[in-house]
């Protein structure tokens, strides 16, 4: 099943919960507003010309300008970009940010390009989608395979075409160019904030909880650190290189320092045991944080996992059929659209700061982010209690209501 089909399935699950007056408008969310496919010719360092295919999809702009990342990956295709743009629509609405959903991508393996080739590719891509992006139209950001440097090139290209510097056209930029403090750590922080709120609601004490984290990149390491600092025992950490286990809890600051010195790998960290990769899901712990890839929690894992709370740091880590099993076993899942939305929340702050040319401290950013994430999780929790459904379905109900009410109030142009 394709990513777009998964998204359509999710809409189908929400349909019965929606008020009749908006249910018949759900088709608006089944059709992306605008999809752009571009050809990107790049002069390579050897003088040859190679062509790459690029995409930008704006799924819904009913609640504001489009917002969503740009992915540089060999598997990028229109179907995936459409689905990712739709999930951004849902995410922004569930968090009540004044954005619609968009997403972009180029089918390329960035590791095979030199820095100059990467810059030429990025600038040509930005020039090709120039027509439909802008601080009031659609604001790209980094995603898989893209970096703050790539955002700087996109911002510069857009600005050169406009004849003046427009920092607010992208987020996730370097801080010197109008990027926001706290952006790099925001997603992991959001996982902790939403996780702690839900833990309170289900009567789970974070101070005594055992935690397992899959993925020790940007998101997983920050979430692990915050749980560690608040008294939890992080007993197991898994990345592509190794699976580490320590019954009394792993020293997370030490592990982060080790990882930095060890070329980004956690293998060989001496103060814990390395166990088999497949053992990860068999460990008993109150909280599991999948913060790596999609589709990792299968039906089999859902039947056997011994936990109370799953926090989706990654996008789409839980199969729909697996989630039904988790629900029947009374295991709470905080869905990706809320759980990992710290990144887009701080992207929103970056955009606001750029428009005002006035910048906040990291403390201010963290306080404002915590407030938005806590409000979002409390809205979603309330919806779930009202409808006796999962938090994911509740997030979708809330998001669909907000988007479709905006849609109805705006009407159809030219009418």
Image (cartoon, grey):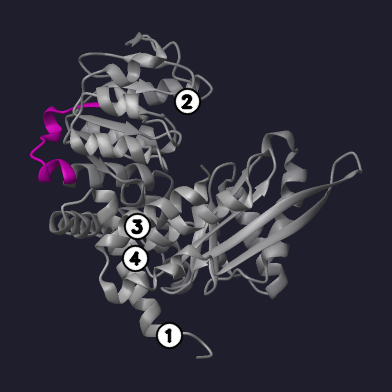
Residue 133 picture quarter: bottom right
Answer whether residue 210 is magenta in the image.
yes
Q: Residues within 10 Å of mark 3 (few under 14, many from 20)?
A: few
For label 2, the residue is: 260
The image shows residue 124, relative to residue 276, as above or below, that is: below
Q: Are marks 1 and 2 in contact (CB under 8 Å)?
A: no
The image shows residue 280, relative to residue 82, as above or below, that is: above
x, y percentage for residue 283? 26, 18
Residue 365 appears in the picture as rendered: yes
Circle 3 SS class: loop
**337 relative to 113 in the view: left or right:** left
x, y percentage for residue 204? 11, 36
* CA–CA distance in space, label 2 to label 3: 26 Å
For label 3, the residue is: 361
x, y percentage for residue 105? 62, 51
Q: Which mark is residue 400?
A: 4
* CA–CA distance in space, label 3 to label 4: 34 Å
Circle 4 SS class: helix
Task: Give 225 or 273, whichever is nearer the viewer.
Answer: 273
Foreground label between 3 and 4: 4
Circle 1 SS class: loop
* CA–CA distance in space, label 1 to label 3: 40 Å
User: Which residue appears farthest toward the left when viewing the image?
Assistant: 203
User: Magenta segment, which residues?
Assistant: 198-211
């Amino acid at each position: 099943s394709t990513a777009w089909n998964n998204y359509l399935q999710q809409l189908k699950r929400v349909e019965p919960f929606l008020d009749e007056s908006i249910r018949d408008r759900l088709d608006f969310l089944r059709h992306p507003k605008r999809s752009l496919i571009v050809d990107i010719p790049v002069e390579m360092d050897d003088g040859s010309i190679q062509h790459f295919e690029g995409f930008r999809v704006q799924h819904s702009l009913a609640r504001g300008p489009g917002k969503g990342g740009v992915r540089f990956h060999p598997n990028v295709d229109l179907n995936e970009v459409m689905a990712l743009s739709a999930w951004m629509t849902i995410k922004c609405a569930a968090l009540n940010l004044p954005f619609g959903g968009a997403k972009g991508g180029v089918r390329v393996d960035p590791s095979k390009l030199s820095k100059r080739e990467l810059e030429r590719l990025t600038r040509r891509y930005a020039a090709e989608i120039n027509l439909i992006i802008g601080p009031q139209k659609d604001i790209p950001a980094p995603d898989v395979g893209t970096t703050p440097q790539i955002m700087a090139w996109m911002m510069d290209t857009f600005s050169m075409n406009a004849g003046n510097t427009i920092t607010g056209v992208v987020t996730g930029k370097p801080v010197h160019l109008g990027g926001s403090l706290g952006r790099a750590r925001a997603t992991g922080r959001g996982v902790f904030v939403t996780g702690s709120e839900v833990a309170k609601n289900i009567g789970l004490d974070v101070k005594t909880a055992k935690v397992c984290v899959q993925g020790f990149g940007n998101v997983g390491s920050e979430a692990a650190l915050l749980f560690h600092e608040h008294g939890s025992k992080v007993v197991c950490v898994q990345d592509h290189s190794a699976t580490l286990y320590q019954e009394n809890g792993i020293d997370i600051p030490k592990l982060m320092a080790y990882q930095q010195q060890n070329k980004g790998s956690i293998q060989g960290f001496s103060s814990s045991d390395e166990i088999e990769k497949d053992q990860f899901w068999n460990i008993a712990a109150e909280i599991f944080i999948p913060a790596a890839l999609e589709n990792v929690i299968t039906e089999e894992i859902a039947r056997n996992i011994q936990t109370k709370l799953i926090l989706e740091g990654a996008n789409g880590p839980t199969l729909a059929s697996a989630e039904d099993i988790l629900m029947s076993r009374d295991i709470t899942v905080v869905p990706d659209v809320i759980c990992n939305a710290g990144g887009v929340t701080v992207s929103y702050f970056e955009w606001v700061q750029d428009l005002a040319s006035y910048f906040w401290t990291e403390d201010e950013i963290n306080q404002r982010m915590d407030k938005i994430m806590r409000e979002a999780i409390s809205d979603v929790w309330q919806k779930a209690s009202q409808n006796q459904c999962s938090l994911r379905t509740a997030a979708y109900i809330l998001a669909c209501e907000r988007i479709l009410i905006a849609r109805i109030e705006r009407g159809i142009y030219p009418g």
